[in-house]
Amino acid sequence: MKSRGLLLTLLCAMTQMNAGTLPEGTVLFAESFDEVKQWSTGAFATAVQNTMTIRAGTSTHRDGGNGEILEQDVFGDQTRATTDNYTITRGIYSFLKEAKGYEAELSFEAKADDVPRPAEPWEGIRIALNYATEVDNYADSYNGLSGTFPWRSFRLKTRIPANLTSASLTIGILGKQGSVSFRNVKITVTGPPRASLFRADAPPPYKGHDLKALRGFNTCDNILKDDRIGKAVKEWNVNLLKLHLHLKQIPFGLPDAELEKHLEPTFRKWDKALEEAGQAGTFLIFQAFAPWREKNDWAHSDLFYTRPGYAEYFVKIWKKIAARYRGNRRIHAFELLNESCLRIEKQPGFPDYEELMERAAQAINAIDPERTILVQPEEWFGCRAFETLRPIRAKNIVYAVHFYLPFPYTHQRIGKGRAQQITYPGECQGRYWDKSMLRKALQPVRDFQKAHNVHMLVSEFSAIASAPNREKYLNDLIELFEEYNWDWTFHAYLEFYGWSPDYVAAPGYEQRKWTDAKSWIPRPDNPAAKVLKRFFHENELRREAFDRAKFDREFSPSPGAAHSGTVFVTADAENALRPEPMRDRPGSCTHPTWNRKAVWAVTPQLPEEKWVPFSFAFTPEKDGEITLTLLVNDSVDRANKTKTPCTLAWDDLSLDGASLVNGGFELRDAKGRYTSWPWIGGGTFQHETISPRNGKRMLVLKGKQQAAQRRIKVKGGEKVTFRGFVRVVGNAGDDSKILRQPSSKQN
């Protein structure tokens, strides 16, 4: 018989259920092990004094209990135990059915003796809540337990699925030897259903952009070849591209100088991507991918939560990235970590997943307060991971989700033994998958979104090009994204052929390996590509206001003109700048023909070897932000039809009516770069002999180089006047006097 205390607990819980709400602390299930007949059991399991003990290796037992282990490998497969199965299971749906949607906690005490470390984290000591829903069968399990230890208390957070159809509890050992004992096993309510948090009057969530939607591609370094960003935008009309930073290529524990050296090749790639993206009109996401792992680690991110220094190093890398790209508005967001999966218990003193994300996000907030930050849930890519995700305590957070359900359909032929032909709509894993089932699969994400009033971006989704009716699957899925006002990026463009939107399966592909390039052939007009293009057609592009090619065509100095420079000012999307005529000053201040909201001011024809004052004025129509860009114009010889690049120096810059930072170029960061002046088109230079007009430093730009300061705040209707000094340094071909960016050791 169960104890009197347990009966009272259950009666109390039933009373609360009948009242319609389940307060925090409500005990849904408590196992005393007084009655074991409810458990699937064997000679290896014994119950004594409210304790269940399971001994592996005591029989030739295999596939005991439920047999199937509802965990996922790297490909999302439900997998079976690879060792002997000494587990017992009991049904608990009757205890949980009135608590659907509630946040809960599985708590228990355990002690163990001589349980070997297994090959997979979900093996060894096993305790798991097995859920079946309308969409999936899966387990929430406490992983990574093995060895010998005395009685210890453990807790596992879970959320009882809102669409739960059955549930069971499994305990025991997946392995060939050892023993484990359990006692005080309970499931307790820790929070309300997400639906109870929905607000009808919630304000629009932060989404990090002012466009109707962002729609685009995941891609890789291949996009950086041969102006492929521009070609992608021209062909597909995408306004978002996502690029990766592979953390596994960065050795752990490097000092600052060495870390920056390892990051620089990636930064050069990203700089190039930003330049091309600006010209094409698309935005970029920079993402951290595939973090470190060591030999015998179960998952590629366990080190963050178990080894000293890794979490701090991760944050340090993001601080370097944030400082490098502070204020760059061509970057839509940083995605902190891709498909993390913590399979084991974090160690005391280490962050959990949400804490790690918070540390990185808060560090970025401090460096670049306006930067959008993307956070995925932990546990690979499943929508159900949103069931237990705690909102991140930082600013400018947008949440990302990956969607590959049903997995045997989206990944058919990938991996060993995968089904060859699964169609959509159709049966898969005992369920009929169509648009209504896709909607149900997305519901945990939707519930999280509505409960916490946040914006969502689907940063990966796809189906292998050989999947029958791929176009129907993508259409149904994207229609749901559009219905929910989610941004999205399709996986993938210019990566593996099988994921490509413009490839299909080749005739006879069934007889080849899926990794064989001959399994796929280009077909740009395939039905799936047409689906994507139909949605991409609705995209708004946002090109950089400055177009160097157009500038070169339009700027035409008089014959034999000496060198000159340009200051180019652009405003945010909803603003316009009104230039003032330069009646009493040489030079010009007008709108460029391609952007009637911007202002450019061309300096007078500059004499050699002399600092020349230069000023102009404009008035913004509205409160907002501007970007101020310094450029160098070619010296034009019309008689010989030639242009000679030149080098100009700038110094003592200021704004009346707005605040320009470091206009004297005296402040530099640790790498020697001028503070608040991120470079758009090439490096910066100093001159051996030319002295600054004031102080110790000046800015020198060579040829096609340009420098900009962004996010300068202005007031609507208040005139802004630029003042500064400019001088000719000499022809750009005279490199003998031109030095690269000074080191941090120089004054």
Image (cartoon, helix red, strand yellow):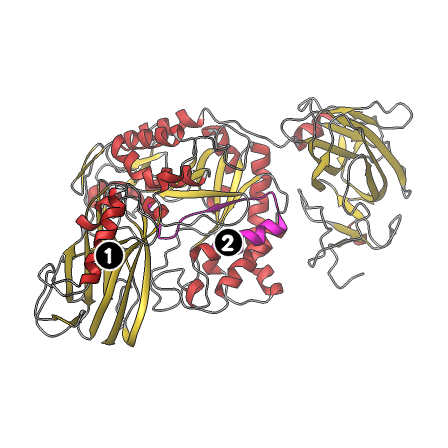
Is any atom of residue 86 visible in this view? Answer: yes
The residue lying at 19 percent from left, 57 percent from top is: 7
Residue 552 percent location from the top left of the image: 71, 30
Instruction: From this view, report whether residue 717 is shown above or below residue 188.
Output: above
The amino acid on which the numbered mark 1 sits, given as a three-letter code, is Thr
Q: Which residue is mark 1?
A: 9
Q: Secondary structure at mark 1?
A: helix
Q: In the displayed structure, does residue 551 sit left or right of residue 204?
A: right
Which quadrant: the N terminus?
Answer: bottom left
| Region rendered in magenta | 357-382
Task: Please tell me which residue lies in front, 311 or 582.
Answer: 311
The residue lying at 62 percent from left, 42 percent from top is: 328
Question: Disc count in the image?
Answer: 2
Residue 205 percent location from the top left of the image: 50, 35
Instruction: From this view, report whether residue 65 is shown above or below residue 101.
Output: below
Instruction: From this view, report whether residue 679 is shown above or below residue 573.
Output: below
Q: Which residue is mark 2?
A: 358
